[in-house]
Image (cartoon, grey):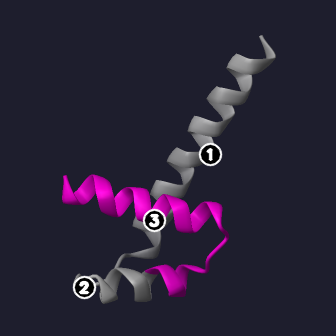
Amino acid sequence: MAERALTAVIQETYIQSISTRSVDDLVKALGMDGIAKSQLSHLCEEIDERVTALVGLRIM
């Protein structure tokens, strides 16, 4: 459950265009070691895929 909550927070920061450094600082403030840029990029790619799928459904 905690992992899902963290993922949601990171995805929200992406939507709001917060920098990767700020996201890393936020993760550290939550008591974790930080987040790798590659991991952050992967989560952001998932958002892009979901949005693309949603837009595709609405066009049809």
- Main SS of residues in magenta: helix
Reply above or below: 7 against 30: above
Residue type highlighted by circle 2? Asp
Q: Could you tell me if the residues under marks 3 and 1 are in contact, i.e. CB atoms within 8 Å?
A: no
- Along the polypeptide, which appears first: circle 2 or circle 1? 2
Q: Could you say where residue 9 lies in the image, as x and y percent from the top left?
A: 43, 64
Which residue position holds label 3?
Answer: 10
Which portion, as a residue range, is magenta? 1-23
Residue type highlighted by circle 3? Ile
Mark 3 or 1, closer to the camera? 3
**Magenta run includes residue 12:** yes
Residue type highlighted by circle 1? Asp
Which residue position holds label 1?
Answer: 48
What's the residue at 24%, 85% (across, down)? 33
Reply above or below: 57 against 9: above
Mark 3 and mark 1: Cα distance apart in space: 13 Å
Residue 4 numbered mark, or none: none
Q: Residues within 10 Å of mark 3 (few under 14, many from 20)?
A: many
- Along the polypeptide, which appears first: circle 3 or circle 2? 3
Residue 15 image-quadrant placement: bottom right
Residue 16 appears left or right of 46: right
Residue 58 image-quadrant placement: top right
Q: Could you say where residue 26 lies in the image, as x and y percent from the top left?
A: 41, 83
What's the residue at 40%, 65% (across, down)? 39
Asked which secondary structure carries label 3, the reply is helix
Mark 3 and mark 2: Cα distance apart in space: 15 Å
Which residue position holds label 2?
Answer: 33
Q: Residues within 10 Å of mark 1 (few under 14, many from 20)?
A: few
What's the residue at 68%, 34% (across, down)? 52
Q: Could you tell me if the residues under marks 3 and 2 are in contact, i.e. CB atoms within 8 Å?
A: no
Residue 30 image-quadrant placement: bottom left
